Image: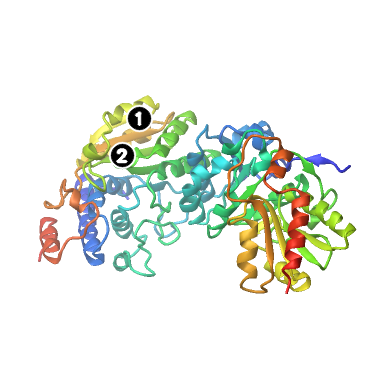
């Protein structure tokens, strides 16, 4: 059994590791215990700005600090970042100020808090903003590796992390992680499964089941949704001739939308999208939510068979 | 730049002339709020703000954040008088490729510290500048200008509460109370009742002044700068369109340009010889 961990813990570890840089500052909106910025706060209270329960203010305080040469990391729940969307759009993205926003507790995997807390649209909305890099890593190791790269990014970013634990895939493989580069976790030529976040593990599990049936899948961890690794996608479309995308996010506008938008203009191949089917969630356990929303490995297996049947 | 009161008044008059010319040339823009704010900003730049027009990105400069970013002609007029941009640049207001974008933008115009456009954002941004200054161990200040209609935005009060919590004595705010917003008088759109009491309740140091009396303005800036333990706000009673008779207290000139005839009258009233 592999080690289990939550991506938000990787974020918290990274902030602490980055604290040697005196320009790194942390902003909180009363959820530091949950997003895991609390470790930084305990070590460096003088460089941690409590914004109370005020996300709109937090985003722009961060923008002001960035304009003065600081490297702000602001976090709250993914869903609450959304009420500051216009601040992110006009105050951060438009002047291209390098504010790094982290939305934890993203997706239906968040579970029993219910539909109000389960952001299923964050990746879609932030992806529409010029200058903004959008990430959704799948384990704590890759989350830490990506976060550690942000001070050198020089532009704003949004990263979704998850509340609950999932299997760790990258222990000892931190060097494989680079912003903007998808990671091929498994090779196969019948279909390419392109996944992000908690569905990367489900995709690997699906690939093993499919292999037993004679179907060989490539599995990609597309931890960066924007900029999308289009070179990799084109190569996989060419090689496999069919793509399944998998994400704990609406099928509208997220990873599946991004891949489809690209592929239709380069190497058109059949695509099936695993994701939340334009509906809200409800209170249930994390695994129960994945089952309810059609996001488990067996759903991915079905999508693979459907997409292969559509190959011309 | 140290000017006496009459010199600052003359500085502001020259800015008023540029404001009406800019809006007339573009046949679009916001003259009313530019004319109401201009005495306050003129006094700030001409007597107080530590900036270097030849080095606009000097990190230890005081920051000025025009949160009511539609009143950009006022800002551009100041920047031209100060030498951040040329008077020729003022002709680029709302013109393709121009440094004088419709709303003030830090990526387009030297001397602009904040990309404005959506109301209710500047005070938070200024708060970030103030916290950064403290972390740097610098005595630089962050000055912010909001409109009275603007404080109807809830996010202003998030910032108002947070700035007091963080004891930001280097954060200074002007509220340009011209009493008119886009659609109508504030009294009709959203009554704000006792504005000074609201800022008092949020823990700010508060002073109410006549925003067109230059002596009072300069004294108020002195007062603001003397407050070191908490944020300070100057609530300035102003007249929208101040200095041009047909624009004064007239909601129609919140966002409308003068005709050729109206421009001639405005320039005449502002002491420009035909």
Secondary structure of the residue carrying numbered label 2:
strand
- Report whether A312 appears left or right of A264: right
Could you say which is closer to the camera, residue A310 or residue B61?
A310
Q: Which of the numbered marks, if any, corresponds to residue B175?
A: 2
Could you say which is closer to the camera, residue A304 or residue B262?
A304
State how many labels appear.
2
- Report whether A181 appears left or right of B196: right
Residue at 43% x, 33% y is B169
- Report whether B185 appears left or right of B156: left
What x and y, as percent, mark residue A195? 72, 56
Residue at 76% x, 60% y is A304
Residue at 44% x, 28% y is B229
Q: Nearer the N terminus, badge 1 or badge 2?
A: 2
Residues behind callouts 1 and 2 on a single chain: yes
- Contact (CB < 8 A) between labels 1 and 2? yes
Which image quadrant for residue A259?
Answer: bottom right
What x and y, as percent, mark residue A150? 66, 52
Q: Chain under label 2?
A: B
Disc 2 residue crowd, few under 14, some 14–19, many 20+, Cα 10 Å: many
Question: In the rendered image, which residue does mark 1 sit on?
Answer: B199
User: Is residue A41 at all visible to an observer of this figure?
Assistant: no
Could you say which is closer to the camera, residue A74 or residue B223?
A74
Which coloring applies here?
Answer: rainbow
Could you say which is closer to the camera, residue B78 or residue B53?
B78
In space, the residues marked 1 and 2 are separated at their CA atoms by 11 Å
What x and y, as percent, mark residue A124? 57, 54
Residue at 61% x, 41% y is A281
Q: Is residue A188 above or below residue B253?
A: below
What x and y, as percent, mark residue B218? 27, 40
């Amino acid at each position: 059994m592999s080690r289990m961990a939550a991506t938000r813990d990787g974020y918290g570890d990274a902030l602490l590791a980055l604290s040697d840089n005196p320009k790194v500052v942390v902003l909180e909106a009363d959820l530091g215990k949950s997003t895991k910025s609390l470790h930084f706060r305990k070590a460096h209270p003088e460089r941690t700005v409590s914004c109370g329960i005020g996300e709109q203010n937090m985003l722009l305080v961060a923008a002001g600090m960035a304009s003065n040469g600081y490297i702000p990391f602001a976090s709250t729940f993914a869903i609450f970042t959304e009420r500051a969307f216009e601040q992110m759009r006009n105050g951060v993205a438009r002047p291209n100020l390098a504010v790094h926003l982290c939305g934890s507790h993203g997706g239906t995997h968040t579970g029993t808090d219910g539909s109000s807390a389960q952001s299923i649209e964050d990746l879609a909305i932030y992806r529409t903003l010029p200058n903004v890099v959008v990430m959704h890593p799948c384990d704590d190791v890759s989350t830490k590796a990506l976060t550690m790269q942000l001070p050198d990014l020089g532009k704003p970013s949004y990263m979704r992390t998850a509340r609950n634990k999932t299997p760790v895939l990258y222990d000892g493989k931190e060097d494989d992680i680079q912003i903007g580069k998808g990671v091929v976790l498994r090779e196969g030529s019948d279909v390419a499964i392109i996944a992000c976040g908690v569905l990367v593990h489900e995709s690997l599990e699906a690939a093993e089941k499919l292999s037993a049936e004679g179907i060989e899948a490539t599995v990609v961890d597309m931890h960066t949704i924007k900029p999308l690794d289009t070179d990799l996608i084109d190569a996989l479309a060419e090689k496999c001739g069919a793509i399944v995308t998998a994400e704990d996010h609406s099928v509208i506008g997220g990873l599946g939308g991004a891949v489809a938008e690209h592929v239709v203009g380069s190497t058109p191949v059949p695509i099936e999208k695993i994701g939340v089917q334009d509906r809200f969630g409800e209170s249930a356990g994390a695994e129960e939510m994945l089952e309810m929303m059609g996001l488990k490995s067996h759903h991915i297996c079905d999508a693979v068979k459907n997409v292969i049947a559509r190959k011309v | 730049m140290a000017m006496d009161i009459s010199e600052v008044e003359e500085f502001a008059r020259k800015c008023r002339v540029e404001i009406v010319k800019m809006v007339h040339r573009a046949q679009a823009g916001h003259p009313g709020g530019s004319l109401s704010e201009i005495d306050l900003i003129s006094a700030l730049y001409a007597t107080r703000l530590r900036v270097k027009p030849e080095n606009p990105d000097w990190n230890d400069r005081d920051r000025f954040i025009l949160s009511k970013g539609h009143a950009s002609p006022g800002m551009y007029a100041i920047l031209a008088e100060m030498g951040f941009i040329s008077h020729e640049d003022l002709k680029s207001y709302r013109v393709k490729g121009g440094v004088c974008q419709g709303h003030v933008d830090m990526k387009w115009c030297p001397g602009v510290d904040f990309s404005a456009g959506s109301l209710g954002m500047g005070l938070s941004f200024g708060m970030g500048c103030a916290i950064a200054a403290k972390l740097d161990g610098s005595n630089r200040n962050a000055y912010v200008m909001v409109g009275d209609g603007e404080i109807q935005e809830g996010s202003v009060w998030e910032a108002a509460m947070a700035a007091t919590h963080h004891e930001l004595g280097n954060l200074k705010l002007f509220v340009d109370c011209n009493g008119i917003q886009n659609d109508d008088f504030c009294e009709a759109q959203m009554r704000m009742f006792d504005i000074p009491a609201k800022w008092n309740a949020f823990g700010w140091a508060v002073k109410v002044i006549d925003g067109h009396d230059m002596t009072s303005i300069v004294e108020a800036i002195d007062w603001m700068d003397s407050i070191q333990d908490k944020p300070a706000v100057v609530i300035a009673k102003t007249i929208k369109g101040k200095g041009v008779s047909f624009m004064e207290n007239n909601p129609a000139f919140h966002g409308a340009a003068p005709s050729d005839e109206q421009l001639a009258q405005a320039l005449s009233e502002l002491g420009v010889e035909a």
